Image: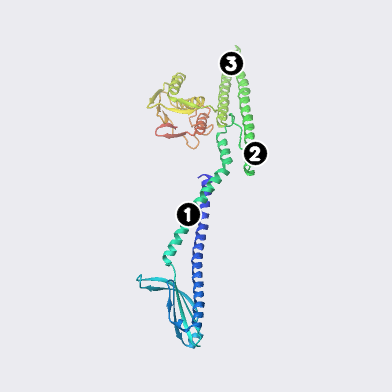
Amino acid sequence: MKLIHHTISKLSIVMIIILTFWAGFFFYSILDEILDETDDSLENYKHLIIQQVQRDTAAINNSSDLMSQYFIKEISEKEAIHYQERYFDSTRFYELEYEFDPVRVLKTAFRGQDKKFYELTIMISTLEQDDMIEAILWSIVILYITLLICILIVSEFVFRKSLAPFYKLLDWLNKFTLGGKNPPLENPTKIKEFQRLNETILKMTRRNEEMYSQQKQFIENASHELQTPLAICRNKLELLAERPDCTEGQLEEIEDIHRNLGRIVKLNKSLLLLSRIENGQFHETKEVELNPIIKELVEDFQEIYEHKKLHVEVEENAVCKIHINESLANILITNLLKNAMIHTPNEGSITIRIQSTGISFTNSTDGNALDQSRLFTRFYQADNKKSDSTGLGLAIVQSIVHLYHFHISYSFDGKHRFDLQF
């Protein structure tokens, strides 16, 4: 969920709660105000009627008009002394409409000019409470829903406007690539927090660029500086082996040293390659078709491992195309194919199945299943480890797979099988 939608949803809940309480308070306040106004009218009618009765005893006869009606009846002095004035709601039957309508009633007692006590009942017509409540309720609901929608629309517009620098910064960070050609951050804003965020991000990216540059330089230096002395050592060993005074034992020692130096060269190249992959130094990508790469590498490796008399079958069920750095695509297929070639016994078989969404490498074996928890870690080798294996091939494969968000899995059903899914 986006930040703006998360904020709006929280704001909506708060606004709904506040407006619900406020609507209820407003609704009951309106009803109370209507009752107060009606009671005030009854109070005024009471004073007018009592004054009229005090002046003219003929007014004692009940009277009525369109909106009000009153009744006067004589009561005892004892009843009048303990009489309590009260307001209440009731109904009155209208013969013309032949129905009962709501009225507000006031009952009070007073002493007339003739020294007698009377009970005064005044009724005044009111709006039908059910209709009035329904009308007020619908008005409040419509008003507050409209108000809530307007507040949320305005809030979203304001939030989008306010958070525009934040989203612009996110977009710039999403496109930022270490070691690549990155455009300058142009994100002017008057908000101090966003200004500080821009400054912090720029400082962080500059530090990362410096560290990346230093690391890249170190890898390049290590690649050149280590390869040169190793090549010199191997050449000197070859010259030493050609001397006529070398004994057979010395030649065996020289051969062993030469073989280990070759392994060191391979390890050095593999480790440097692994570092470059993990540091994201392969930026250029394009659509690469893997079918011709696989067929070409199969031919090359069959010549190298001709002595093993391996049977390699390539099943092309579809054309497999992926977006990847071309060099890394070659390294990925090379390592998986080489892994299968090295660990397949003499006269064994290798099957490569090519689908549009993935490639599988299956090879026969005379060993057991591999340890899946350590299979793609550096320097892992099976029990029957080979002398020409560095233990880094599958680690490099895993790094490339992780870099491009592919998926690789291993299974064993009497044969080793690696499934590469794109």
Q: Is residue 335 left or right of residue 253?
A: left
Q: Residue at x 52, y 58 (%)?
A: 18
Q: What amino acid does circle 2 point to?
A: Glu
The answer to whether residue 96 is visible is yes
**Label 2, residues with CA under 10 Å away: few <14, some 14-19, many ≥20:** few
Q: Secondary structure at mark 2?
A: helix
The disc placed on residue 238 is 3
The answer to whether residue 388 is visible is no
Label 2 or label 3, whichever lies nearer to me, is: 2
Q: How much space separates mark 2 and mark 3, taking CA atoms?
A: 58 Å
Give residue 119's position: percent from left, percent from top: 47, 82
Give residue 178's position: percent from left, percent from top: 59, 31
Give residue 360's position: percent from left, percent from top: 42, 30
Q: How much space separates mark 1 and mark 2, taking CA atoms?
A: 42 Å
**Label 3, residues with CA under 10 Å away: few <14, some 14-19, many ≥20:** some
Seen in the picture, residue 250 relative to 367 is either above or below; the reply is above
Q: Secondary structure at mark 1?
A: helix
Q: What amino acid does circle 1 point to?
A: Ile
Seen in the picture, residue 76 relative to 402 is either above or below; the reply is below
The disc placed on residue 199 is 2
Sequence-wise, the earlier of marks 1 and 2 is 1
Label 1 or label 2, whichever lies nearer to me, is: 1
Q: Nearer the viewer, residue 243 or 141?
A: 141
Give residue 99's position: percent from left, percent from top: 36, 71
Say which quadrant the C terminus sits in.
top left
Q: Residue at x 46, y 57 (%)?
A: 141
Q: Nearer the viewer, residue 371 or 272?
A: 272
The residue to which callout 1 is attached is 145
Q: Nearer the viewer, residue 337 or 28?
A: 28
Label 3 or label 1, whichever lies nearer to me, is: 1
